[in-house]
Amino acid sequence: MYKTTIAILFLLAFLQLSPTAYAQPKQEIRASWLTTLGGLDWPTTKANTPQRRAQQQQELRDILDRLKAAHFNTVLYQARIKGDVAYPSEYELFTEAFTGHAGQDPGYDPLAFAIEECHKRGMELHAWVVTIPVGNERQIRSLGKKNVVKQRPRICKKYHNVWYLDPGHPGTADYLSGIVKEIVGRYDVDGVHFDYIRYPEHSPKFPDKDTYRAYAHGQDWRQWRRDNITRIVERLYTDIKRLKPWVKVSSSPVGKYKDTERYTSRGWNAYEIVYQDAQQWLKQGIHDALFPMMYFQGNNFYPFALDWQENDGGRWTVPGLGVYFLHPREGNWQLEEVVRQLYFLRGIQADGQAFFRNRFLMDNTQGLMDELREEFYTAPAVWPAMTWQDSIPPTVPTRPRLSFAEACTTLAWDASTDNSAPFSVTYRLYASNRYPVDTERADQLMEVRVDSTHYTYRPSAPWMQKTYWAVTAVDRYGNESRPLALNTPTVNDLPVLQSLPALPTGHTYVVTDRTGKEVLRTAQPGTAPLEALRSGFYRVSEVDAKGKARLIGLFVR
């Protein structure tokens, strides 16, 4: 009770702070689960004609545009559902979500399309793979002869009218390994995210006594089950890292690992009920991140969030928030409940947050998306580096080039190299109206991922113009080089002027546009002379009686 009280007081202290009391972190994982099961999040349009296929693809672009605008950096894309998949596979049939018919190809590869569109927006895509469940009777029948129950009956068990892979059978790890290697080998995914990598609820009655007799060799059956899941995790992690060591491996365990000293799990936890030894996966080094499903309120959330963080094994823990409970038909939580959880996670410097699920973000349920955009995610953020795989950053880019035009800024540099060659590096761009650009500040991060060595910046409004720019190189593991300044001031850090100050006698102002063309000459102070200028970005010089000019500031209209 004492420790619980301390935890609550600790939380209340954080809640006294406003969001602006926290600097926006540059490194923070911000993820959304994008469900393709039944098209719950995407797609809602069936790709039965070329026009509807294009509409289906545009739906995803619109979703990703909104996530990028809210400074999300990760999409957990449901690639394997329950015995069917959301990409063309040699193992399982296409999910019915894309065409309305199981096994029917929508005429394009949704996973490849989603990866490309995420990368265009500087976001990571992690292939979300539902592992152990393979569907109810209706789903199995809809897949015909090409379903795992028909193809691999020895590794499947029926329990409460739902079919599952049997974690205790060695063939289960082999089967899942084939699916995972297909995804990682064929696609440029940034991560693989395992869901339901556990035994089902009420699992003491799961019908695996024959498997236990064949493979347990007298081991305690509870620990045998935990070891079964851990062996699958280790096998998949090893297979992924052999193919592409930079691909992040994660899963979404039950939100309470087990009872803590602070609070009881109240009979529902990962370790004892569904045999997920998830914290051990981090400590054993067979996981890079966990996204525990912390769809709880009050003391069922805060003590367990601390427990995950305190037992992260030097890897990442990213609590999943059950924002679907904000909907009246789901739980009718108040928005303040989620806001308190966000405050708390920022306060303890958690590695990030994930949201289940995307539809409730897109619908702005109870103003959730507004709250994120305006208070918590006001600047971009990036994943931390996966230093346990590689900790050497790329070389600094060289030979900076920058030119201003009326409506854009053109930036270029020479490529960096990396110790993990031949794998490519990408670049991050930073900008500020003060020099030098501070690449540790999230609010100066302009582009998270640039795939080439040149970039054109077109501001959406004149006041979005930036004066000074810097670029860094980033390898596939997230290691970031030192910055290269793309331009430097001609005088010390010019201020942005709101009006023209009074001049000494005989002096005048000369105002030039971004191309250097003179657009105004005046000796009048104040704002009136500047009001005649059209929207744009200007430099202001003071010219003395002898005609000598010096830059004194910048003006944006």
Image: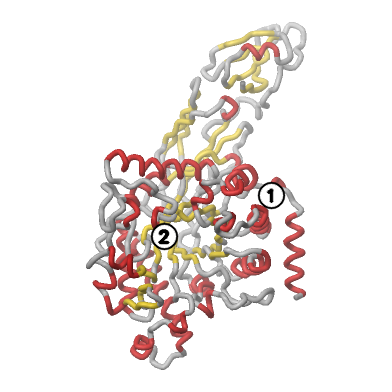
Question: What is the x, y in percent for residue 193?
Answer: 43, 62
Q: Quadrant of the C terminus?
A: top right
Q: Is residue 2 left or right of residue 362?
A: right
Q: Is residue 129 left or right of residue 178?
A: right
Q: Residue type at mark 1?
A: Tyr
* Residue with the most extreme bottom position: 218
Of helix, strand and loop, which one carries label 1? Answer: loop
Crowd rating for badge 2 (residues with CA inside 10 Å; few <14, some 14–19, many 20+): many
Among the two numbered marks 1 and 2 on one chain, the one whose residue lies closer to the N terminus: 1
Q: Which residue is mark 2?
A: 128
Q: Which residue is mark 1?
A: 22
Q: Is residue 146 left or right of residue 461?
A: left
Q: Residue type at mark 2?
A: Trp
Question: What is the x, y in percent for residue 279?
Answer: 54, 72
Name the one closer to the observer, 549 or 151: 151
Crowd rating for badge 1 (residues with CA inside 10 Å; few <14, some 14–19, many 20+): few
Residue at point 50%, 49% (across, down): 73
Tally the marks. 2
Name the one closer to the observer, 490 or 460: 460
Q: Quadrant of the N terminus?
A: bottom right
Q: Quadrant of residue 48?
A: top left
Q: Is residue 420 left or right of residue 335?
A: left
Work out whether residue 47 can be spotted: yes
Tell me: residue 373, above or below residue 171: above
Tell me: residue 419, above or below residue 511: below
Q: CA distance from mark 1 to mark 2?
A: 31 Å
Work out whether residue 450 can be spotted: no
Residue at point 56%, 73% (across, down): 257
